[in-house]
Each structure stands twice: as structure tokens, then as C-alpha cells.
Image (tube, rainbow, N blue to C red):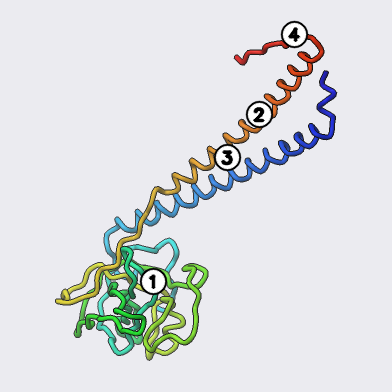
Amino acid sequence: MYRFLLTPRWLALHVVVLLVIPAFVFLGRWQFGRYEERSTNSDVVTTNLEAKPVPMGDLVPPGQAVKDGDRFRSVTVAGTYDASHGLLVRRRPQEGRNGFYVLTPLVTGGGQAVLVNRGWVPAGATADTAPAVPAAPTGQVTVTGRLRPGETEASSGIKERSGLPQGQVLLINPARIGSGLPYGLVGGYVELTGQEPKSQQAPEPVTAPDVGSGGGLNFAYGLQWWAFIGVAIGGWIMLIRREVADRRAKDGEPAKVQTAN
């Protein structure tokens, strides 16, 4: 009765099922891995955002890069802005509007400085129109902000290109920007959230990072892929039982009805 399982049509079906099951196992494991990765990232970012501000020098010694585990950590740093070397960071939309980040070095003394993202400004009326940028305050200031690692093409997904207007960049890359400055830069930057004394006019604050659901969707997708394994096996068994029932009916035998517990 079950010799039909060895016919070419059924052998092809067996092969498909045997290939589908490990594929669904792999996809489920991949989604669970993404869930763990995003949940860990969400926990790190949330913890750092909620931590009390600490002096930047406690986390980033001179000449060192910002550690990945310290991203979005709230820090304080004092110094004077070097507006003469300020930059605009292109292609930075915020709340659905095109615009620029306003990047200004903050000189901290001892031949050292840190790039400060002072905020966001909307793009001009046309592509050739320079945006209106509030001037950086003069004199000593104390900045509070979120510590960020420097950007690269790999980390940001943004491709560098030449031929940009004077004073504009695509990436906040301290190593590249610092090559033309008369002082050393910290290997990262600070995303301003507060400043003393406050400026009467300032760019719009950069929106806080979206921590998200911590990979909850990935966990659900992983469960779905593994549920598909049961669907594939159940469908395969159902087709076999239906074929057996059809053959028995054709031979005049009463089909045996099997009930699932």
C-alpha cells in the first residue's frame, strides 16, 4: 500500500520537505540571534541614557576612541567653541524634514578638542541655498551630551564622496576631520543635550535615539519560522494519509479514519 512513497513524484516531495525543515530551523535560529543582539543593544543604550552624566575624560582618555559600550552615555565637557572650523553634516533628516547637523569643535585645552553636534537645522529653500545656522557661543561653556563613537561608512551606511561644498561633510569622522585641525580630537563626538551658559539662539536639539522594542519582532518571527516546521511536517503526513485513503477507496477498501489525540 505504501510503495507509492517511492515513486518519483513522492520522492521529490520527500526531498522538498527534508530541505525545508533545516532551512526553517536555520531561519528561526537567525531570528532568535537577532533578538538577543537587539535586546542586548537596547539594554546597553537604555542604561547609558539613564545614567547620570560623568566627565568625558573619565570615559575617553586623550587620543582614544569611544568604546562601543559607552555610546549614548551622558557626559559633560568644558571648553570654548572653535567656530572657525565648524562644519555642516549633510543628509541628516529629522522628523521627516531634510537638514544638516551643526558640528563645532570644542577646544578643551592641552592641545585637545572634541567635536560637538550642537543640533539640527533645516535645509535651505534650494539645494544651493546655505541653511541658516545659529552662531556658536563665545567664551567658556560646559556641554552636556550623549557620547557617540565616530562614524564610518560601515557603521553608518553612508558613503563618502568628494566634491562637497566648502565646510560640509557626510560623516562625523573625527580621524578624517581632525587631519586638518591644529589640535587633536577625541575619537568620537558629543551630541549636545544641554549647555551652560545657555544660548539665546541654537539649532534644534537632535532627537533622542529610538531604543525600540528590543528585538521583540525578531523573537516573534523566530517562533513563526519554527511553527512552519510543524506545518510542513503536518502537511506532508496529511498528503500521505489522503493518498492512502484514495487508493483504498479505489480498491474498494473502507478508508480507515484516524483521529488525533
In front here: 74 or 225? 225
Identify the mark nearer the N-term, 3 or 1.
Answer: 1
Q: Which mark is residue 254?
A: 4
Residue contact at pointers 2 and 1, CB within 8 angstroms: no
Name which quarter of the figure residue 23 lies in: top right
Residue 84 position within the rendered picture, expressed as x and y whole percent measured from the top left: 30, 90
Residue 183 position within the rendered picture, expressed as x and y whole percent measured from the top left: 37, 88
The image shows a total of numbered marks equal to: 4
C-alpha gap between disc 4 and disc 1: 80 Å
Residue position for label 3 = 225
Q: Which mark is residue 235?
A: 2
Q: Residue at x 29, y 79 (%)?
A: 125
Q: Nearer the viewer, mark 2 or mark 3?
A: 2
SS class, disc 2: helix
Residue position for label 1 = 60
Instruction: Give amino acid for label 4.
Output: Pro
Identify the mark nearer the N-term, 2 or 1.
Answer: 1
Identify the mark nearer the N-term, 3 or 4.
Answer: 3
Q: Residue at x 24, y 74 (%)?
A: 203
Identify the mark nearer the N-term, 4 or 1.
Answer: 1
Instruction: Give amino acid for label 3.
Output: Trp
Left or right? Give the position of 13 relative to 217. right
Identify the mark nearer the N-term, 2 or 4.
Answer: 2
C-alpha gap between disc 2 and disc 1: 58 Å
Q: Nearer the viewer, mark 3 or mark 1?
A: 3
